Amino acid sequence: MKKAVTAIVLTAVLLTACGKAAPSSTGHEGMNMSSPEPGGHTGHSAETAKTDEVKATFTLTPDKPQSKKDAQAGIQITDNSNKVIENFDLSHEKKMHLIVVSKDLSYFNHIHPDYKGNGLFDITTQFPAGGQYKLFADFVPTGKSSTTKSQWITVQGNAAKPVAIQPDTNMTKVVDGKEITLAYDPLKSGKETTLTFTIKDAATKKPMTNLQQYLGAVGHVVILSDDAEQYLHVHPMEEKATGPDAKFMTTFPKSGVYKIWGQFQHEGKVFTVPYVVKVP
Ligand SMILES: [Cu+2]
């Protein structure tokens, strides 16, 4: 326990050092609680909020959701004295981004809860199989810095066979008729990295130059450590780019294995391409 707290504090310090800290709070009471999540946004001001200023309480209905059935998630945002936080800035066109991943990171979903007022966000979604999932709510309370809060949940139903998270050896992938290649300079923990996605038509191999804006930018990238403890939210260097290259900046806070999801839009459809990298 003491070790875990030290790790969280250390992460916060590391992220603060590069100007990307998000506030975190602690809580271990089970469901209906807030939980710690150091995270970062490269595209926002470097202002650092005080720890414990913002709390997110996740409530599921039903409280034991079933796989492949509708489940409603409520996310109540308050300050640490349970006073409702009412105002949120739009960030990438939304007041909240919610990332849902399975424990093995094989399942990824990026959705946008509705804001109901009084600090309450709400979304109905489904989980593909039984097992553990982690929800990450990413939002900006007005006057505060970008904040990420997370919660592990358990979904009832037949579990999928876990998929091992292995670093990719081939950085070119084909998704929905697009051929996407991810390139970067040698990765190093704590050092700013540029991730370049190059997108071609998989059939013709022609570089694509007509990517559409997705959430107000050329694309959206989410990065998680393999244990889902480190959440890095990354944004493009050139927001208005249309391809074939989409460049993003991030800093991997420590060495380890990370999964990267790039999301882009073409002809009205969003496609998601996952990669696994090892940061020495
Ligand atoms: Cu989003």
Image (cartoon, rainbow, N blue to C red):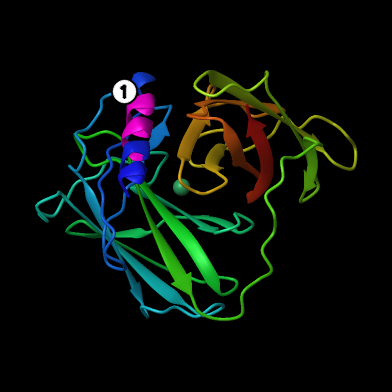
Task: Name above or below for residue 98 compared with residue 11.
Answer: below
Nearer to the camera, 200 or 32: 32
Residue closer to the observer: 22 or 217: 22
Residue shown at 38% from the left, 33% from the top:
11
Percent x, y for residue 210?
69, 34
Amino acid type of the residue tagged 1 in the rendering = Ala
Task: Give percent across and percent down for residue 110.
Answer: 51, 53
Is residue 85 found left or right of 172 in the rendered image?
A: left
- State whether residue 5 is above or below residue 28: above
Q: Give left or right: position of 256 versus 80.
A: right
Residue sitting nearer the eye, 181 or 251: 251
Specify the principal SS of the magenta part: helix
Tally of numbered discs: 1
Examine the rendered structure and indicate whether residue 80 appears above or below residue 29.
Answer: above
Quarter of the image for residue 244 reads top right
Q: In this view, does 144 lie to the left or right of 213?
A: left
- Region in magenta: 8-16
- Residue at (32, 50) in percent of width and height: 1
What crowding class fits label 1: few (fewer than 14 Cα within 10 Å), some (14-19), or many (20 or more)? some
Where's residue 237, x and y in %?
Answer: 53, 22
Circle 1 SS class: loop
Residue 25 drawn in magenta: no
Q: Is residue 214 shown to the viewer in this render?
A: no
Residue 12 located within the stretch drawn in magenta:
yes
Q: Name the residue under label 1.
A: 46
Residue lying farthest to the right in this orientation? 204
